[in-house]
Image (cartoon, grey):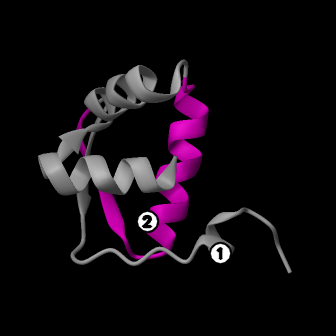
Amino acid sequence: MSLAIVEFLGKKGSVTDIDLQKELNSNFGEASFRELNRELMKLELAGILWVSRLTKGKRLVELTGKPTIDQNNMSGSSE
């Protein structure tokens, strides 16, 4: 899902978290808001994107620059 988020942001630029979830739901079926938040947190901690608050309940998601994803770090396993 992380790769799909980065690809979508690469095409569209910055989007709201609501629009991003709609896009993911159309590609992956029902992706929960909790799953989306988990993926956004991973990508934000990796320095690939950042999330900022627009209004109450609405956030802006945008890439920080050229993304590089290390799939080993994105698996969620702790070593």
**Residue name at image x 24 percent, y 78 percent:** 66
- Looking at the image, tell me whether mark 2 or mark 1 is earlier in sequence order: 2
The image shows residue 60 at horizontal and vertical percentages of 23, 45
In the picture shown, does residue 77 fall above or below 1?
below
Query: Dividing the image into 4 quarters, which one contains the C terminus?
Result: bottom right
Check residue 1 for magenta coloring: no
Check residue 34 for magenta coloring: yes
Numbered disc 1: secondary structure: helix
Residue 20 visible in the shown view: yes
Left or right: where 25 falls relative to 9: right
The image shows residue 75 at horizontal and vertical percentages of 70, 63
**Residue name at image x 43 percent, y 65 percent:** 44
The image shows residue 27 at horizontal and vertical percentages of 42, 28
Hey, what amino acid is under mark 2?
A: Glu
**Cα gap from disc 2 to disc 1, whole angstroms:** 13 Å
The residue where tag 2 is placed is 44
The residue where tag 1 is placed is 73
Hey, what amino acid is under mark 1?
A: Asn
